Amino acid sequence: MFGKEAFQLIVELDLTDDIKPFNETVIRQVLEEMQYLYEANLLDSNAIKNDGNTALLPSVKFRHIVLTRNKRCILAYLYNRMRRLRQMRWDLGSILPAEINSNLLNAEIQWFRSYNKSLATYMRSIGDNCGLNLTVNMLPPKSLYIEVKCLTDYGKLEIENGQVVTLKKNTYHLLPRVICEPLIRQGILEHLI
């Protein structure tokens, strides 16, 4: 059935919010199907043009619709992978975890680096000669210090005033929000309300 493999790509996107390994085999199958449909349309459209055989017109239109649908499914698959990568940049920071990085194509890794570079350039350009880190405060802060619980043995953390705090599993700390937010997003700290 035409379009079945292309639909499989869209279903794969709905199964999880994570980035799975790039499904190259299904993409290749869809592209081969599209090549077959294009060649069949080319033959039939030449027959319509040369022989005036208008009985082939509905099949040409049908194959053209399937071609368009397959193209849209592939573009949706690629766009959603890029959108998830962009969101991970805001959630996790400029360095992706190894398990996510291993699921990416070289082109996606290059795109992520380029996006990092563009975002860093923009953040340096705003603010009073020192830039503004837009990824720090995703929501307006209610207080400058927050109480956190350490979920893993992280080690030593130096605060802006020079104080060194040792983050051990199941310890509680009152730390500056600016330092804690990236660690909370990485799953090292948990914000206690």
Image (spheres, rainbow, N blue to C red):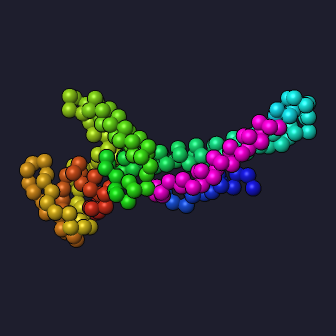
Query: Which of 73 and 45 lies nearest the eye of the viewer?
Result: 45
Q: Is residue 33 highlighted in magenta?
A: yes
- Whether 104 is drawn above or below 41: the answer is below
Pick the residue in front: 28 or 3. 28
Q: Is residue 105 magenta?
A: no
Q: Magenta: predominant secondary structure element?
A: helix
Q: Tell me if 97 is positioned left or right of 47 in this view.
A: left
Residue at x 51% of width, y 60% of height: 16
- Provide residue 105's location: percent of width, then percent of height: 44, 49
Residue drawn at point x = 34 percent, y = 56 percent? 97
Q: Nearer the viewer, residue 136 or 14?
A: 14
- In the rendered view, does 21 fall on the left or right side of 30? left
Can see residue 13? no
Q: Residue at x 28, y 49 (%)?
A: 142
Q: What residue is at 18 percent from the left and 59 percent from the top?
A: 174
- Left or right: 73 as drawn, with respect to 147: right
Where does the magenta region start and end? 18-44
Q: Nearer the viewer, residue 21 or 174?
A: 21
Q: Position of residue 30 (x, y in %)?
A: 64, 50
Dividing the image into 4 quarters, which one contains the C terminus? bottom left
* Residue 50, above or below 108: above
Q: Is residue 150 visible?
A: yes
Where is the N terminus found, in terms of image quarters?
bottom right
* Residue occupying the far left of the picture: 162
Residue 72, how many percent across, how many down?
A: 63, 43
Instruction: Where is residue 27? Give x, y as percent.
Output: 59, 51
Left or right position of 94 against 4: left
Number of labelled discs?
0
